[in-house]
Image (cartoon, rainbow, N blue to C red):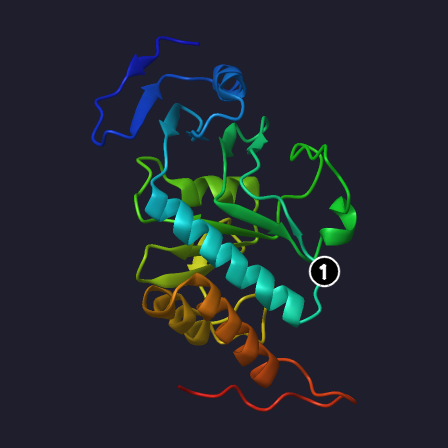
């Protein structure tokens, strides 16, 4: 490790080391093992951050919503949770809140040894921003080549798509779930605090069946209901 200096903590749940190279980041992140820290590396700095119960609650809820959607639509997806995503050639790394292989699910089915230096990145990552990282995690996702990021800050839900030129742009539709109206997904996220996790998931499943799942015998589902 080069001359690493402990940066001033702006919040009690994180600290940042400056002047860190990739190998030093990798050793430090590996040394943490299964401890409840996120290690984010932007090429020069590594941030170690713990997450709040609010963050973890939203992380799992968004994941449950996404997984319920894929199940009702009959889609094969593979969830790799908060696996460490890093590439030595890009000198970047982080742990997403949730990540999924969708289009590339057949390539990673039953795999336990993913290596992003050789394997494709997840097709979709979930980023919960109820407490923001001091580093630019979205830029790191872009460097790692993640095609789609769903971000949620407790109020606002947004889908970002990786475009030519290596930048993310806000989108009106998801590439992974093109039939999903994003405003409806956001509506069910807001419903959570009023009705609770399980009741909201059940209501969301019922809405997907009524509005997005083709009827038996083929044909198209009815236009999504506007609430």
Residue 170, image x, y percentages? 42, 62
Residue 17, image x, y percentages? 34, 19
In the image, residue 130 above or below residue 71: above
Specify whether residue 162 is in view. Answer: no
Q: Residue at x 59, y 31 (%)?
A: 87
| Residue 193, picture quadrant | bottom left
In the image, residue 18 above or below residue 214: above
In front of the other: 85 or 171: 85
Q: Residue at x 40, y 69 (%)?
A: 186
Residue 10, image x, y percentages? 20, 30
How many C-alpha atoms fall within 10 Å of the one at disc 1: few (<14), some, or many (≥20)? some
Q: Residue at x 72, y 35 (%)?
A: 112
Is 90 left, or right, of 184 in this rendering? right
Q: The N terminus lies in which quarter of the figure?
A: top left
Is 121 left, or right, of 132 in this rendering? right
In the image, residue 206 above or below residue 190: below
In front of the other: 196 or 149: 196
The residue tagged 1 is: 76
Is 60 left, or right, of 128 in this rendering? right
Count of numbered marks:
1
Residue 53, image x, y percentages? 35, 43
Is 5 left, or right, of 179 in this rendering? left
Mark 1: secondary structure? loop
In front of the other: 110 or 60: 60
Specify whether residue 124 is in view. Answer: yes
| Residue 134, picture quadrant | top left
Q: The C terminus lies in which quarter of the figure?
A: bottom left
């Amino acid at each position: 490790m080069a001359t690493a200096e402990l940066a001033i903590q702006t919040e009690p749940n994180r600290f940042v080391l400056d002047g860190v190279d990739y190998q030093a980041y990798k050793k430090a992140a590996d040394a943490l093992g299964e401890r409840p820290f996120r290690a984010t590396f932007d090429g020069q700095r590594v941030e170690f951050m713990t997450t709040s119960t609010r963050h973890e609650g939203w992380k799992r809820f968004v994941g449950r919503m996404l997984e319920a959607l894929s199940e009702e639509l009959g889609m094969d997806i593979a969830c790799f949770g908060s696996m460490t995503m890093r590439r030595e050639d890009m000198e970047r790394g982080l742990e997403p809140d949730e990540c999924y292989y969708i289009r590339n699910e057949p390539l990673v089915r039953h795999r336990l040894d993913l290596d992003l230096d050789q394997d494709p990145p997840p097709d979709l990552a979930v980023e919960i921003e109820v407490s923001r990282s001091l580093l630019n995690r979205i830029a790191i996702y872009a460097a790692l080549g993640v095609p789609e990021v769903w971000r949620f800050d407790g109020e606002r839900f947004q889908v970002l798509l990786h475009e030519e030129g290596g930048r993310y742009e806000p989108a009106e539709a998801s590439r992974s779930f093109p039939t999903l109206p994003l405003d409806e997904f956001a509506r069910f996220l807001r419903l959570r605090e009023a009705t609770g996790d399980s009741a909201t998931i059940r209501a969301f499943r019922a809405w997907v069946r009524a509005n997005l799942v083709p009827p038996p015998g083929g044909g198209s589902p009815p236009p999504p209901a506007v609430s």
